[in-house]
Image (cartoon, coloured by chain):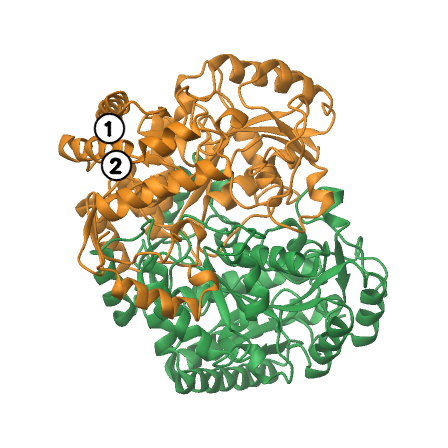
Chain colours: A green, B orange
């Protein structure tokens, strides 16, 4: 192990005296301590000890153009000199909304918020107003931010997930009110028959069926067109909405993952990359449903503001990032990601390890099992699997200078080239060889 | 009326085709259309028609140093060139946490999030984990962001607020699940006897009593030391937490409004000005309670991350803003605000109108009634009052080039000087004279 971690350790020691657990978000925590960034450019991050690493995590998928993109920086710095937030509008929010509305057929009106969590929460609340019903349905294992209803059963495990025909609704945070859990229905992703059965049991109460079309924590495999159609048809018959969480997946096609389905969601929550590296969330969808938020109505059905919502920094950075992420850029990035997956699959074959890769567009995830999982329960990582993926990722981070997401996922950025992809597949080959005995043992 | 609104109107027309109601947050909406900012510096905003106005709203209290402060801009621009968000830590979050922990005695550990809404939500969830109880108590009329539990009864009105001895728990957004409302207890702010009576009825179920110590929407008058002590003592006896929402009020003293109370909150939510003009929220409090969020524990009791939480832009801007807002700056700003209130009270006296002013520190609010309100129900604005305050604020905005918050409140910034205060009291004098007949009629 490289031992240039003294300064990182010192900062962490300071952090432990002021931040709970020494971190402000659990995702950056790693044993024995997190690492701290000095500077980052494109796909390279240099930590405060001067160690340079290639970044395949891109702040949990939020940096589609890597770090410090010159065009985004230029536009943001120009805006900063004219102010960052006002109790008035800016043309920046209008320009950005115009751009986004053009990208996806299902977007007729939109609203900006500050995070994916806020976007999903606003989407759920809007669904309740429109349908006058209290419940939501969501996929077991799917992450949708930290709103109690949206996070239920995200971390279900074999000891509490219950019958697959009727998965248990489990709290993620201790002390979640039972009243909140009672308003959540959990379905098994991509399992049409069971899902429709479960939905039918709550048909009169479901405001929306929430779908992440490529749910990272479920296993990062796409919803099938059949599944989306089945849910869509069910919602049409039962006065419910079909709503998408595309906070992560909007990157998959020019108009989001939804572009390739033959039916479209009523509402879509977004976040991450559409902020161009700055905090953002957004809700877009059908005009008549978004109308619930209209302050000009006779009654205010869904009052909605937010001090920093639609601030000109996030909307300017986001607009520039999305302008740069045009159809050609999306296709090019997806093509490079396909090459990466092929090379990694070749590394898996050479090392002869029981590892598989799932993904869509510019995202993929490693699974420590020979067969690609097709459900949350198949993809579920036991304690041993979790420990081994952490060991592998630590090896990559410390020895190969490769940064991946802590689930074993990569979210590509347009600043990556073949050179970095080669480093990734080579590093993984080394890792697979090194951990082959453990990987083999785990698969039995 | 000045009629230089063609460009503003054109942008709004474009906005209406892409944003619901033509706005992304209701606070910026005004009839017949919102106004759009071209550039802002210090306490002056120039709109896209070239009209310059003095800003006393400061993006809903979030800009303690006005617009485009050179020191904040310099630090942020420097950080932007080193990256805006990473799946790793930065020293920026540690430095900022160190600074904040020193400011308030009740802060032992903290965590950053992206908005006041997220901060309050995280605070409520942490309270539930720690106490193992589901309910929260909150003041009638108090605004705490958009989490269902936190927003209940924020907009209660005479038709639905019920008996003051047991105020009704009312939804703010239509379709709020009854299950959520059932876990909220509403108390009348500053009313010790009634509040304790109400709390007693739910003693076994209350996780936390949430207090905004100068609740803007209740009427912007401070909690009494007696009230805070009574609630504190009740929480000590009943295994509950006393938690403060200081998203707005942290500005009141160097260590927050809490500094002057003889007892301190267990947890405090912050936001607005501590982001230095960029999106932020924060939760701080006792070590043993914040420990619920620790990822290093044997079990993860409250998993907590957030893609943009503690990003180095918001934490850098926030740190610089708070360094500049030292004890001397706080006192100076509060002194100027006191002068402003005195001058406005003189304007009220000269115009002989039934208007009063409440406030604390660098904030105040006008009430269209001769006697200062001491409760939400006294301060409640009827439809007629709301219409008249809007008329007055429109006059100030369009004719006097003065920007206030739509409740009739001002949130001062350190960039204001006596010159701007004189303009404010003069403009208000003109407004009071103009609207005197209507104001007099309203008061009867």
Q: Is residue A263 above or below residue B118?
A: below
A191 or B94, nearer to the observer: A191
Q: Is residue A416 visible?
A: yes
Mark 1 residue crowding within 10 angstroms, few (<14) / some (14–19) / many (20+): many
Of pointers 2 and 1, the one earlier in the residue sequence = 1
Q: Is residue B187 above or below residue A116?
A: above
B370 or A67, nearer to the observer: B370
Contact between marks 2 and 1 (CB within 8 A): the answer is yes
The Cα atoms of the two marked residues, 2 and 1, are separated by: 7 Å
Labels 2 and 1 share a subunit: yes
Q: In percent of the image, x 22 and y 46: which residue is there?
A: B399
Image mark for residue B413: 2
Q: Position of residue B329 (x, y in %)?
A: 22, 28
Q: Quadrant of residue B80?
A: bottom left
Q: Is residue A225 above or below residue B133?
A: below
Q: Is residue A318 visible?
A: no
Q: Is residue A268 above or below residue B432?
A: below
Residue at label 1?
B333
Q: In percent of the image, x 80 and y 55: which residue is there?
A: A168
Q: Quadrant of residue A421?
A: bottom left
Left or right position of A152 against B104: right
Mark 2 residue crowding within 10 angstroms, few (<14) / some (14–19) / many (20+): many
Image mark for residue A102: none
Please state the total of marks drawn on the protein image.
Answer: 2
Q: Quadrant of residue B221?
A: top left
Q: Secondary structure at mark 1?
A: helix
Q: Secondary structure at mark 2?
A: loop
Left or right position of A156 against B96: right
Left or right position of B419 against B325: left
């Amino acid at each position: 192990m490289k031992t240039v971690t003294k300064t990182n350790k010192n900062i962490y020691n300071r952090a432990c005296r002021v931040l709970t657990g020494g971190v402000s978000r659990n995702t950056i925590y790693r044993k024995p301590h997190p690492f701290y960034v000095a500077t980052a450019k494109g796909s390279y991050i240099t930590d405060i000890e001067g160690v340079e690493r290639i970044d395949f995590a891109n702040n949990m998928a939020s940096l589609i153009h890597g770090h410090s993109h010159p065009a985004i920086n230029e536009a943001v710095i120009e805006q900063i000199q004219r102010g960052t937030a006002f109790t008035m509008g800016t043309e920046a929010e209008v320009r950005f909304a115009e751009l986004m509305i053009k990208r996806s057929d299902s977007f007729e009106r939109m609203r900006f918020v500050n995070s994916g969590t806020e976007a999903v929460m606003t989407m759920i609340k809007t669904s309740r107003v429109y349908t006058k019903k209290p419940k939501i349905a969501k996929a077991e294992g799917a992450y949708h931010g930290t709103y109690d209803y949206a996070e239920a059963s995200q971390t279900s495990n074999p000891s509490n997930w219950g019958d697959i025909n009727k998965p248990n609704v489990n709290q993620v945070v201790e002390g979640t009110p039972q009243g909140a859990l009672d308003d959540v229905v959990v379905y098994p992703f991509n399992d049409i028959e069971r899902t429709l059965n479960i939905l039918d049991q709550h048909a009169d109460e479901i405001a929306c069926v929430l779908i992440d079309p490529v749910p990272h924590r479920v296993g990062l495999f796409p919803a099938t067109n059949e599944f989306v159609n089945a849910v869509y048809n069910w919602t049409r018959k039962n006065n419910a909405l079909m709503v998408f969480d595309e906070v992560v997946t909007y990157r998959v096609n020019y108009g989001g993952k939804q572009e390739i389905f033959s039916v479209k969601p009523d509402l879509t929550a977004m976040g991450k990359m559409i902020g161009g590296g700055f905090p953002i969330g957004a809700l877009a969808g059908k005009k008549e449903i978004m109308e619930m938020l209209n302050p000009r109505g006779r009654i205010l059905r869904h009052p909605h503001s937010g001090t920093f919502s639609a601030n000109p920094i996030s909307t300017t950075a986001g607009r520039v990032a999305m302008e740069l992420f045009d159809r050609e850029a999306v296709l090019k990035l997806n093509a490079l990601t396909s090459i990466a997956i092929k090379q990694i699959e070749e590394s898996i074959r050479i090392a002869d390890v029981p590892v598989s890769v799932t993904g869509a567009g510019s995202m993929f995830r490693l699974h420590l099992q020979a067969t690609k999982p097709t459900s949350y329960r198949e993809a579920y990582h036991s304690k041993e699997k979790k420990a081994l993926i952490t060991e592998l990722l630590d090896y990559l981070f410390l020895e190969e200078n490769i940064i991946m997401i802590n689930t074993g996922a990569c979210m590509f950025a347009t600043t990556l080239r073949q050179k970095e992809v080669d480093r990734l597949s080579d590093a993984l080959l080394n890792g697979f060889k090194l951990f082959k005995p453990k990987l083999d043992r785990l698969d039995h």
